[in-house]
């Protein structure tokens, strides 16, 4: 049996066609059901669809053998106990620092609103910029407008969300895309099965 953890939401829509090309299909009846463990066209493969931030946790602990998650989530998690084996090249975006202007970054202690607490902390530490991180779970763009923070660290794709809220992308922290991760123990015990999936997926990237 092989269990694959997939991220809900925007990544899922781009992941399913990739898996289908590699030979793994999940029927709409399964996707639309309230089941948490979904059957696939292959009796030996099950899929769980969970919050993106939970994917590395399930894979790290071996509750899933493989998973697909954004690099943003993996950077934040630290990716202990799992191998990042493929860049799927989907759900591409950038992790960036944004503010109303570059002047807003000229602070002795920079207030940064973000859900990427670890990535932001590490970035500003490397720059030697003292900062206070304010953890938010969404609507980061609001924080500079209401003076909760001087800047934000968030994902940027088209830049439209920033623009609509009067923010400018300033510093680039990392390029983000979805990655295939594998539990390190599963990679040893189910090596043949996992490698054949990696090869099948890689051919269709
Ligand atoms: P955009 O307006 O196109 O720059 O998109 C920015 C918004 O979409 C932000 O709220 C991001 O958190 C979210 N976003 C953009 N790309 C991704 C992605 N690849 N994965 C998850 N969220 C994303």
Image (cartoon, grey):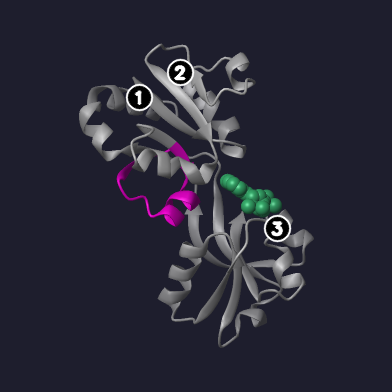
Cα separation between marks 2 and 1: 9 Å
Instruction: Find residue 14 and name its label.
Output: none
Judging by the rendered image, the residue that carries numbered circle 3 is: 139
In this rendering, the label closer to the viewer, 1 or 3: 3
Picture residue at 37% right of the left edge, 15% below the top:
44
Picture residue at 28% right of the left edge, 27% below the top:
195
Q: Give the percent coordinates (x, y) of residue 183.
A: 31, 38
Which of pointers 1 and 3 lies earlier in the amino acid sequence? 3
Element at label 1? helix
10 Å crowding of disc 2: few (<14), some (14-19), many (20+): some
In this rendering, the label closer to the viewer, 2 or 3: 3
Quarter of the view holding residue 139: bottom right
Q: Give the percent coordinates (x, y) of residue 23.
A: 44, 16
Judging by the rendered image, the residue that carries numbered circle 1 is: 197
Q: Give the percent coordinates (x, y) of residue 48.
A: 49, 28
Q: Which residues are magenta?
A: 68-87
Verify whether residue 83 appears in magenta: yes
Judging by the rendered image, the residue that carries numbered circle 2 is: 24
Verify whether residue 98 appears in magenta: no
| Up/down of 22 relative to 74, above or below | above
Element at label 3? loop
Let me know if residue 140 appears in the view: yes
Cα separation between marks 1 and 3: 37 Å
Quick check: marks 2 and 1 in contact, CB under 8 Å? Answer: yes
Nearest the eye: 83 or 200:
83
Q: Give the percent coordinates (x, y) of residue 118.
A: 46, 63
Which of pointers 2 and 3 lies earlier in the amino acid sequence? 2
Cα separation between marks 2 and 3: 35 Å
């Amino acid at each position: 049996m092989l269990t694959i953890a997939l991220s809900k939401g925007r990544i899922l829509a781009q992941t399913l066609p990739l898996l289908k090309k590699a030979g793994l299909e999940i029927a709409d009846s399964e996707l639309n059901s309230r089941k948490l463990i979904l059957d696939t066209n292959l009796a030996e493969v099950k899929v769980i669809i969970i919050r993106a931030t939970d994917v590395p946790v399930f894979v790290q602990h071996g509750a899933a053998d493989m998973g697909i998650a954004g690099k943003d989530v993996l950077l934040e998690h630290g990716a202990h106990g799992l191998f990042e084996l493929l860049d799927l090249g989907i759900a591409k975006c950038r992790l960036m620092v944004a503010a109303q202007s570059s002047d807003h970054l000229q602070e002795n202690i920079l207030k940064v609103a973000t859900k990427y607490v670890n990535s932001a902390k590490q970035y500003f530490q490397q720059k030697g910029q003292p900062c206070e991180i304010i953890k938010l779970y969404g609507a980061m763009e609001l924080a500079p407008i209401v003076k909760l923070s001087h800047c934000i660290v968030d994902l940027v794709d088209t830049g439209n969300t920033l623009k609509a809220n009067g923010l400018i992308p300033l510093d680039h922290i990392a390029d983000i895309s979805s990655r295939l991760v594998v539990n390190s123990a599963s990679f040893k015990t189910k090596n043949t099965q996992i490698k054949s999936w990696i090869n099948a997926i890689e051919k269709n990237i």
